[in-house]
Amino acid sequence: MNKEFFIKSVELTDQYHSLWVEKYRPTKLEDLVGSDSLISFLSICIEKNDIPHLLLYGRPGTGKNSIVNILMNNLDSIFLIINASEERGIDTIRDKVQSFAKSGAWGNKLKVVVLNEADGLNYTAQDSLRELMETTSKFCRFILTCNYINRISDAIRSRCNEFELIPKPIEIVKRLTYIFDSENVHYTDEAIIFLIKKYNTDIRKIINESQKIVSIYGKLDINILEESFNQQYTDFFSKIFTLKDAKKIAELTKKMIFDEDIYSTLKDYVIKTYNNMDAVIIIADHAYKARIVMDKDLVFLSCIFNLIEVLNLS
């Protein structure tokens, strides 16, 4: 092996494992932060080396991919993995999934199709997927993951064992304290509560944000976190209102945190920067909608587009 290539490979591996979210990613069922019933169910599947069609849903960062990885490492099966948010059309189902699923048995091994972010599949693709699930179930299973269960057709849902991933706050606290103690981080209970409030059940974001703050400030406390988040919001608003391309606005918005404070902070920013009361009314209206609908990111994106229009920034 080329020595230079070997050294670079080692450096990349060390960098990868220096990320807490990867270093502490669950590798066993007992490491998962989730419901006991789901863990028990998956244990039986692994023991029998067989699974039904599965639909795992929940907010980002709740462990859907970790579950898939554990199943891949413990089931003696052949896997095809598709990111449905990037390959959402009928061609993906026909060309990739169908050819894999209909190719017949692979010895004694079960074939498993993993469709990550399956809520990104359009209606036609989902209808084709439903037919495949019916006709190939003898030797092929499907594992679907999604953030928004309401975007999955009833026909597909009826053919899957559904599990919603909602980590309990106490389980998140235990996981975080284990990571922080292992990394010798100085932290306070108030800081952990603040992070959980901000990110809800998105454990991945909590871990990533914690590592970023610690790398800059050397510790986690409430004052540092509040200052950091306020600055993040200000930087985000300053940038989003200068963009002209709708696609770029949508991409940037996806990276934002949709907690109960974002609309309040947005209102303060708009009043200070533009002093426009029509804009304030738009923010209040969308803040109300965000409390009662599931797709909070879409509500916020709608709010941003409405503000750009009323503030004549387009």
Image: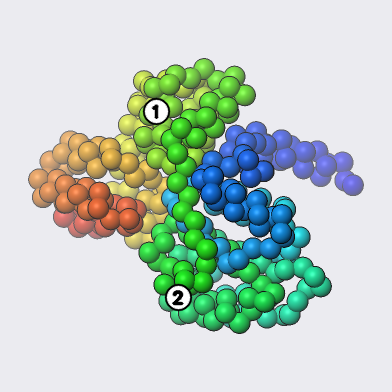
Q: Residue at x 58, y 48 (%)?
A: 39
Label 1's element? helix
Q: Residue at x 41, y 61 (%)?
A: 149
- Residue 186 % position (x, y): 52, 17
Quadrant for residue 114, please give it.
Answer: bottom right
- Residue 111 % position (x, y): 70, 69
Examine the rendering and report whether any part of residue 60 can be seen.
no
Q: Is residue 310 left or right of residue 227?
A: left
Amino acid marked by disc 2: Ala
Residue pointed to by mark 2: 155
Front residue of 153/199: it is 153
Front residue of 65/51: it is 51
Amino acid marked by disc 1: Ile
Residue pointed to by mark 1: 193
Mark 1 or 2, closer to the camera: 2
Label 2's element? helix
Classify 10 Å Cα crowding around label 1: few (below 14), some (14-19), many (20 and above): some
Question: Which numbered disc flags the more N-terminal residue, 1 or 2?
Answer: 2
Q: Residue at x 48, y 79 (%)?
A: 127
Q: Could you give the CA–CA distance between mark 1 and mark 2, rounded to whole angstroms? A: 40 Å
- Residue sitting at the far left: 277
